[in-house]
Amino acid sequence: MYPDDKRRVGYLVLLILLMHYNLSGALFPDPRIHFISVSLQNKLAYGSGFLMAAYFPFYFYRSFNLTVLKFHALYGAPLFLLLPYLIFFVFMYPLSGDLKFAISYGLIIPCFYSPVLLFSMFRAVRKKYTSVVSVRKPYAGLEMHMICWAVSPWIFMCLFAYLNVIQWVEVIFTNTGFVVNGLLFLHKSGRFERLEKMRLMKKDAMDERQQNDFKQTCLDIGLSSRETEIAQMLCLGKTYKWIGELLHISVRTVDAHVQRIFYKTGARNKIELQQFLGFEIKVFSFNQCYYETDLG
């Protein structure tokens, strides 16, 4: 899977979690909803916030290749965010029926962990982007600040819940962070599309130049147009049978052309023919062009 594909999948999961967070926050808890108990409604409402906050470090770790966040993405967030939620909201809250108790004690560890996670994410982002040469990516600093603004409201969500911040204030902060993250995602996707377009343009230019150079080399050594055509197929690794079927000639005729090609070039096999006509060098040049474009 290409990096941009992983980023799209991660962003889709992020979008689904945001929809779940907004819906559960808007609907729950509501005693008028009889088919879902109030206890389950509270668990769903708080669970969406915990899950969203825990997913953010994993999203940035995978989508933006922030390897410094590996511990928090795989172990820290599940241990210090999801585990307290499971203990106090999923298991203890239904037994006691005391939501205040679950909030007071279930959010202590997440509230202390949130600044640590936020600092780690800032450090990971800064390390990632300050290592980029400013000439190649002049907007790296802007991207870094966008990432920090995007993640900050979600990391402090546990603190908002612990301080019992008004819901509309919490929603504004968290959704603002998501909007910033959306802009960042669009920017990254747009840049990838531009790089891909540049790569394809370079590829087409390289292919055309290869064709012209190959034909000129064959012309210089005295190969006919049919021999040039067959020589190119030989360099591509095609069999005599495949060439004969494509050109509607017999295998014996193909073999006769190949013998004349070997005689004129002095090659004894396909590998020597590739080397003589410079075919391997051209293929290497194309791969190098792709590599450099992908890094840009």
Image (cartoon, rainbow, N blue to C red):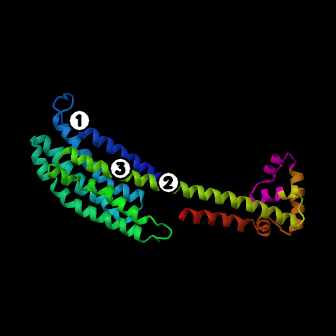
Instruction: Determine which residue is flagged by label 1.
Output: 27
Dot 1 falls on a residue whose secondary structure is: helix
- For label 1, count other residues whose C-alpha is less than 10 Å away and answer few (under 14), some (14-19) or many (20+): few
Q: Residue at x 40, y 67 (%)?
A: 128
Question: In front here: 250 or 43?
Answer: 43
Q: Residue at x 32, y 41 (%)?
A: 19
Q: Residue at x 27, y 62 (%)?
A: 118
Q: CA distance from mark 3 to mark 2?
A: 16 Å
Q: CA distance from mark 3 to mark 1?
A: 22 Å
As displayed, is residue 125 above or below residue 19? below
Instruction: Determine which residue is flagged by label 2.
Output: 190
Earlier along the polypeptide chain: callout 2 or callout 1? 1
Q: Type of residue at label 1?
A: Leu
Q: Quadrant of residue 117?
A: bottom left
- Label 3 or label 1, whichever lies nearer to me, is 3
Earlier along the polypeptide chain: callout 3 or callout 2? 3
Q: Position of residue 284 (x, y in %)?
A: 67, 66
Q: Residue at x 32, y 58 (%)?
A: 149
